[in-house]
Image (cartoon, coloured by chain):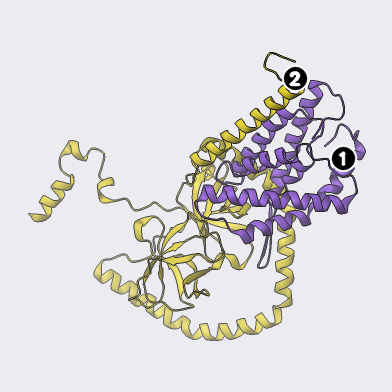
Chain colours: A yellow, B purple
Amino acid sequence: MSKSGYNGPQRRRISRRSIAFTLIFISIVVLLADRQQRSMLASGRLTTDNISSKIIGFIATPIRGLESLFVEAGNRKNAYKENVKLKAEIERLKNIENTVFDLQLRIKRFEEMLDIESSSYLPETKFIARTVSESKGPFVHSALIDIGINKDIKVGYSVMTTEGLYGHIIQTGSVSARVLLLNDLNSRISVMSQRSRGRAILVGNNTKSPKLSYVSNEIDWREGDRVITSGDGGVLPSGLPIGTISLNKNGNREVDLFYLKEPVDWVWVYPFTPIPAPENSLPENANAQGDVTPDNIVQKATE
Amino acid sequence: MTDQKTVSQTQSFSLALQGFLAGIIIVFLSLLSLDLGILHFGFSFLPVFIIYFWPCAASYTWSLFFIFLLGMYYDIASANPLGIWTLTFLILFMTLDGVPKSKSGLGITIIEFSLCVMFSAIVAFLFGWLSLGRPPQIVTLFGNAVASIVVFPIFYWLRSLFVTIRSPSMSL
């Protein structure tokens, strides 16, 4: 028996327990410190994402094959029905095509007359990327894509599938980038109804159907309306398709996301420079020259 | 986890390291997901397999340390808030300490593994709630748990193959 009153095995047991509880204590501290921010160990996350994107990209190949087999089987099964439906759709669209073409020309002419540019801010250049892993777990909804700084991808760029908006870039590594999906708990996107132009905020809730918040009841919102990005705040381009409105059991408005229609494999990343606030977009030497300060702008406008 | 055999310190460290490396491989597999039409399968609970089959003769202290690192790595790789899986794995490991594992074959092992997964799901749910400030999606959480249990026999078979190739006492 030692001076402490404990024998060898008892001492070992106590020491093991204290190590275990110390590690648990450290984990709780980390958990509380990282609450909702997800900013701790940022460089570690980038390195891990770069490594993971390569390894998972390789091991996910058979799974992607299985998924496409499943989709193919479904497509083949419905091929006849879809063919008939598409033929009817083509007939209908042929009539609309001429009207659209005529309207486009008229709008262009009006824009030239008024000297305005009302087209979408969506650039023509886009980068194609592969989603190497999708995390649609209970805590986060994010995805890892296999391009990053090597393709000049920056935080904030919007990511699209063939169906609609997928999310936006929140982190970029050298060869990978992390996308925050529309339905993640931390996702907030300003949206509008394509029909009524009513504005709202699309709030992710980790389910398949994110909710619409800050909806003005004065504006007409209908079930089945197409929801697109409004471009408010200048963070995302306007006009990106998101989904359609549906009502849940409680009568609250939700959005059925377009991108969930099919498994996501390839995506497009659209470069987009957020529109800066005027006070942040002044030239660096504005103050030195003394001609483009906010005060001067007001003064010149008054003059 | 009770050490029944006498192994050297190097060996017990090596076994803990083996557990950690196997855990890293499993973490990569658990990051994969399967989308079949409207059904989405995630395998978030696969790393519980490693905790369940953690080498019996591995050093306890090193095991704790490696499980801490494994959980941290899993949190980072899956872009989760840090600490959720770290705490879940540590608590599961401590709970399993001293509980003798049955050698009654696949059926009983599946039941034991399912209990471990469900226990982990509850712990992860509670810490997830604490971290996110609102309850995580319980359906997704338990859906992932069930998906991980469904694929368990494949990993059990792979482990058995590994054990047969190597000495049973030294392997995972």
Q: Is residue A264 visible?
A: no
Q: Is residue A242 visible?
A: yes
Identify the residue position indicated by label 1 in the image: B162
**Looking at this view, is A49 or A212 the one in front?**
A212
**Looking at this view, is A49 or A110 the one in front?**
A49
| Rendering coords of residue A168 (x, y %) | 49, 54
Instruction: Identify which amino acid the numbered label 1 is placed on.
Output: Phe
Identify the residue position indicated by label 2 in the image: A7
- In the rendered view, tell whether residue A210 sits above or below residue B53: below
Comparing labels 2 and 1, the label whose residue is closer to the camera = 2
| Rendering coords of residue A85 (x, y %) | 62, 83
Output the chain of dot 1.
B
Q: Residue at x 72, y 27 (%)?
A: A13
Would you call the spot at circle 2 few (<14 residues within 10 Å), some (14-19), or many (20 or more)?
A: few
- In the rendered view, tell whether residue A123 sits above or below residue A17: below
Q: Quadrant of the C terminus of chain B?
A: top right
